[in-house]
Amino acid sequence: MSDSSPNSKTEVRLGKGMILAGWLIALALLTMYFNQWLNERQNPNANPMTSTEGGVNQVVLVRNFQHHYVASGSINGVEVTFMVDTGATTVSIPAHLSDKLGLRSGAPQMVNTANGVVETRATTIHELRLGTITLNNVRANINPGMHGDEILLGMSALKNIEFTHRDGTLTLKQY
């Protein structure tokens, strides 16, 4: 004789619901873990190694899984992600970030990029920070052709910084 009382059916449904909830929680935790792992692979310098000694500010970056140097920093007090690009003449900022960063759109200028010639707008970054390195009044451009959130840290910022590349690390020094 089978037990088909209302209590028995409720317990079965409750048991199935608990199993489903357990699987959903496990899936959510795995998703969070792998998202964090992917973010760390993309930007291993979320908190770059920094030091100041004898008036020299130093930041040491490790390259990411794509062999790029990506690091967290700030522009005008707003947190951003930089990608070091020694082939870029100026710091290049995606247009959709310009208002958030408090940047004024200046004169139009034509620039050569990896994707061809693009019309950008000149701007000046009042304060750019990367670890202990602080730069003021950095020439930059607002680029409508950039769609991500990474800012290319070009030579208009790097020209005042000594940099050394060795064994997968990039050491930046500001004197």
Image (cartoon, grey):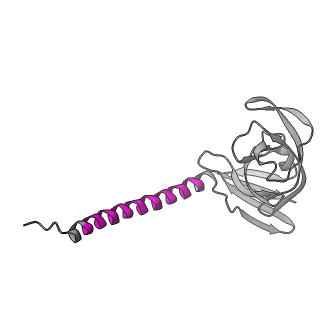
Residue 69 in the image, given as x and y percentages of width and height: 69, 50
Q: Nearer the viewer, residue 163 or 7?
A: 7
Asked if the stretch drawn in magenta spans residue 28, the answer is yes
Q: Residue at x 67, y 58 (%)?
A: 45
Residue 7 in the image, given as x and y percentages of width and height: 23, 71
Apparent side of residue 32 relative to residue 4 in the rendered image (left or right): right
Asked if the stretch drawn in magenta spans residue 27, the answer is yes
Q: Nearer the viewer, residue 12 or 35?
A: 12
Q: Residue at x 84, y 58 (%)?
A: 76
Apparent side of residue 171 relative to residue 90 in the rendered image (left or right): left
Residue 54 in the image, given as x and y percentages of width and height: 86, 69
Residue extent of the magenta highlight: 10-39
Apparent side of residue 31 relative to residue 169 in the rendered image (left or right): left
157 over 19 or under it: above or below: above
Q: Residue at x 26, y 69 (%)?
A: 11
State the quadrant of the C terminus: bottom right
Return the residue found at the far left.
Answer: 1
Q: Please identify the quarter of the rendering in which residue 147 is found.
A: top right
Q: Please identify the quarter of the rendering in which residue 116 is found.
A: top right
Q: Nearer the viewer, residue 9 or 138?
A: 9
> Does residue 94 appear in this view?
no
From the image, give the main secondary structure of the stretch colored magenta. helix
Return the residue found at the far bottom.
Answer: 7
Apparent side of residue 31 relative to residue 69 in the rendered image (left or right): left
Q: Nearer the viewer, residue 175 or 149?
A: 149
138 over 144 or under it: above or below: below
